Image (tube, grey):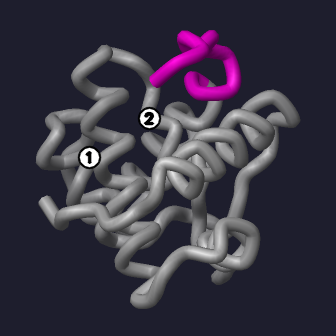
Amino acid sequence: MTRVRISRQQWEGLLGELDLARRQRHLLTYRALLERLQLPTPAMQTLTAALEYLAVLDARAEQPLRSSLVISQGASRLPRTGFFECVERLGRFSGPSDGVAAASWHASEVVRVFEYSYPEEA
């Protein structure tokens, strides 16, 4: 796993954005998050590492993966390939990251995130 270089303030900002998206039942694009969080460069790698770290924390706590709320703005409306590689390592999903199974798993995970009550402090 990549080492995350992110300040506590940025980490809390990320959790706050994801919590707001969850409560409003909508998804965020990587680009929107990058713009809002003002992460240090290389921003995309930093964001990806932070989302993967959050996925590990959620998996350990046996919670739905909040990082599933972040998607590419392309036509697929799915997270990037790295997200699926990460959840495969966590034992949550297996299969190609660009197929029907991935889209179906992602859709059901998003619903689980929307319906789950997370503890206040992660």
Disc 2 is placed on an element classified as loop
Say left or right for 74 vs 49.
Answer: right
Q: Residue at x 25, y 41 (%)?
A: 93
Q: Residue at x 29, y 62 (%)?
A: 4
Image position, residue 52 (x, y; %):
32, 53
- 39 or 101, which is in the foreground? 39
Q: Amino acid at mark 2?
A: Leu
Q: Amino acid at mark 1?
A: Val
Image position, residue 98 (x, y; %):
38, 70
Is label 1 in contact with label 2 (beta carbons under 8 Å)? yes
Quarter of the image for residue 3 reads bottom left
Q: Residue at x 38, y 57 (%)?
A: 50
- Residue 106 visible in the snapshot: yes
- Quadrant (top left/top right/bottom left/bottom right) for the N terminus: bottom left
Label 1 CA crowd tier, 10 Å (few <14, some 14–19, many 20+): some
Most prominent secondary structure in the magenta stretch?
loop
Residues rendered magenta in the picture: 112-122
The image shows residue 89, relative to residue 63, as above or below, that is below
Point out which mark residue 87 bears. 1
Asked if the stretch drawn in magenta spans residue 96, the answer is: no
Task: Identify residue for label 2.
Answer: 65
Say left or right for 106 vs 3.
Answer: right
Label 1, label 2: how far apart the Cα atoms are: 9 Å
Q: Residue at x 44, y 34 (%)?
A: 65
Say left or right for 17 vs 53.
Answer: right
Disc 1 is placed on an element classified as helix
The image shows residue 68, relative to residue 2, as above or below, that is above
Quarter of the image for residue 45 reads bottom left
Label 2 CA crowd tier, 10 Å (few <14, some 14–19, many 20+): many
The image shows residue 64, relative to residue 3, as above or below, that is above
- Looking at the image, which residue sits at the far bottom? 42
